[in-house]
Amino acid sequence: MTASRWTPYWQAAPMALAFLLFFILPLLVTLVVSFWNYTEYSIEPAFVTENYVTAFEGCLAELPGLCTTLKTYLSTVKFSLLVWLITLVIGFAVSYYIVFEIRSSTVRLVLALLCTIPFWTSNVIRMISWIPLLGRNGVVNQMLMGMGVVSEPQDWLLYSDFSVILAFVHLNTVFMIVPIANSMSRIDRSLIEAARDNGASGWQIVWHVIVPLTKTGIMIGSIFVVTVVMGDFITIGLMGGQQIASVGKIINVQISYLQFPIAAANAIILLAMVLMIVWAMVRFVDIRKEL
Amino acid sequence: MIKKMQPTASRRDVLKGGAALAGIAATGAICAPAVHSAEPVTLRYLSTAVNQAPAIAEQAFRDTGVKIEYVSVTTDEVTKRIITQPNSFDLVDTEYFALKKLVPAGNLMGMDAKRIKLVDKLAPAITKAEIDGKKIGDQGTAPKKVFYLDGQYSKQFSDTPTEWITLIPTTYNADTLGIRPDLVGRPIESWAELLNPEFKGKASILNIPSIGIMDAAMVVEATGEHKYADKGNMTKEEIDLTIARLIEAKQAGQFRAFWSDFNESVNLMASGETVIQSMWSPAVTAVRLKGIECKFQPLKEGYRAWASGFGLPKTLKGRELDAAYEFVNWFLSGWAGAYLNRQGYYSAVLDTAKEHMEPYEWAYWMEGKPAEKDIVGPDGSLLEKAGTVRDGGSYNERMGAVACWNAVMDENEYMVRKWNSFIAA
């Protein structure tokens, strides 16, 4: 039986269709709506750029101060970078340990599965469980005071940048571990043997052999973490005491006031930001090699 | 809290069969008395979970044969559903301040005053912003401003009473600040205390812009910084000034956190993260039920009131429409009112609610007298021990001290933008 030249297309069709229906189409609608006019009780088809102008209102006038949108993005990008860095270090270390230090493949499997245990409960529950721990009268503060480390409760533990980053790292490290461990386990052990035979130290092996060969895994993990943090507003809201701005929250508030067009405009801007970041990342590494 | 869907097939069948009967049904002659007969009518009742008590639905079914199927969503979602999916419910319980958005959208219809039996008994606090003939505050979207429509399907409010009522009140109340008396340690008398640096890092305000800014306005007015013509309808300059005051406080570290739902406010207070904050009355009760001291503190500048009521989608007709009127009439007839009064809300028709309450309950909840016996909640749990007095005193004292109502401003969109800059500051 000879395969028709259409066969590959048919095979790709279900995915393409799902992609079109659930991603491209809604995105197009969002883009279109972002140019519409609105009042609080209606939206009207039109072509106005006002929503984008409003989103960046005062950004030029307030220089060198920052307008709301820039401040919000700056804060979001700050969280993305910090969380990315921390999850990368932890994710790399954990993966390294699982892949190279554990000899028994059963133990390796068990440890890898252990990493996924936190995912057996919902995101929000995992976040909320930090609150009684970190609060003013929480377990951590009581412990610190009991040990005499501090004399009064520490407020910065909760509803602060610290608690937001902590929760993000807690929630997202596994997204780093999985792709990095996956890349690492594909590394041919003889390369490491060869490096060692040639007199490379442990750090040199990590830096010159393992890191370059794990780059694709790192990149995939990074894309996961950065995109999740960029769009998040639930973690920032809950752990930051709703005092920290996030682009997602702004969109959320606008939607709740039925200001769909300007929310759509903000969503498009956010998407553009995320695409730019991802684009910059994949310029460093060819992730196609991995897939 | 969404009740399991009743076998709505019957309802759908009625609708389908109804097409054939449409001619007869249009005359209305058959439908009106038919509510009790044959299949029970099911009404899809859209509102927030707070207003939905299974006990009310059960009692309504026993008394009238109308089945209530609760559809519970958030406050914002109620508004969104009315505007975007007006056919997804038969009866809605929404807040008066939302009407400024809902009525121009034209998806609701006026309720016929002639079909509401107790229409003359509706609380004057709502219909006229009066208590005992005395005017109370009507700043913001006071219900009386949006109570009547020009015509049944009009998109305009009427200043004078007409036959067409936008919403028939279900519950209303007057809100103030919640405090932890044990942690504050001194009397609190003014809204100004919310931004008093004494409570630095221990205050909170609610992160629902249209309500949060009203609380902030109460503070600004209390400090004497500015007197608003209408706190519920600020000018751009007034919005700027209010937000600037909030930003200043935020940057000085005044706030511990903001909250946007009931549970968050309860947790902040119960854990002692905050000692003074914007709060809702049932949330204060919830903190107290944990055995933690919490007070819904009356303040000298008065209260910020809110009210919600029943509305009908424009497309409702036939048996469902009749059933909706029957349910609303039943709702006003006392059982439900007493049920709501016992939760600390106020009901629309006080006389009928009184008939369904024990004298000691009425004295505690409505007259501001010390409880003669233990006060228990609808589920039988102990709310207050004998001897306690309700915060804020009697109905007349409390509703009589209303300073403003929850509102949607003309400059709402600008306000939301400014609020976002406050959060980002």
Image (cartoon, grey):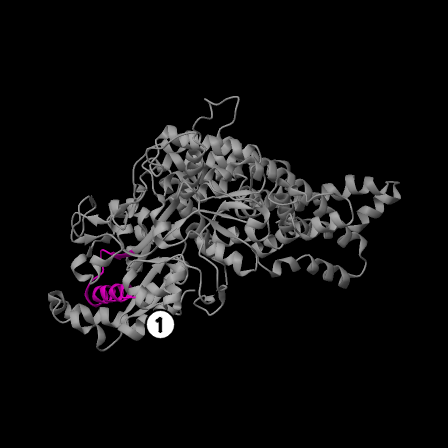
Residue at disc 1, secondary structure: helix
Disc 1 target residue: B58
- Residue B325 drawn in magenta: yes
Q: Is residue B162 left or right of residue B235?
A: left
**Nearer to us in this view, A155 or B71:** A155
Instruction: For residue B273, say whether it is visible.
Output: no
At label 1, counting other C-alpha atoms closer than 10 Å, the crowd grade (few under 14, some 14-19, many 20 or more) is some
Looking at the rendered structure, the kind of residue marked 1 is Glu
Q: Quadrant of residue B236?
A: top left
Picture coordinates of residue B370, whole percent (x, y) = 44, 60
| Residue occupying the point 30% across, 67% down | B355
Q: Is residue A133 above or below residue B358?
A: above
Q: Is residue B259 left or right of residue A225?
A: left
Number of dots carrying numbers: 1
**Nearer to us in this view, A69 or B120:** B120
The span picked out in magenta is: B310-334
Callout 1: chain:
B
Picture coordinates of residue B175, whole percent (x, y) = 41, 48
**Nearer to us in this view, B20 or A92:** B20
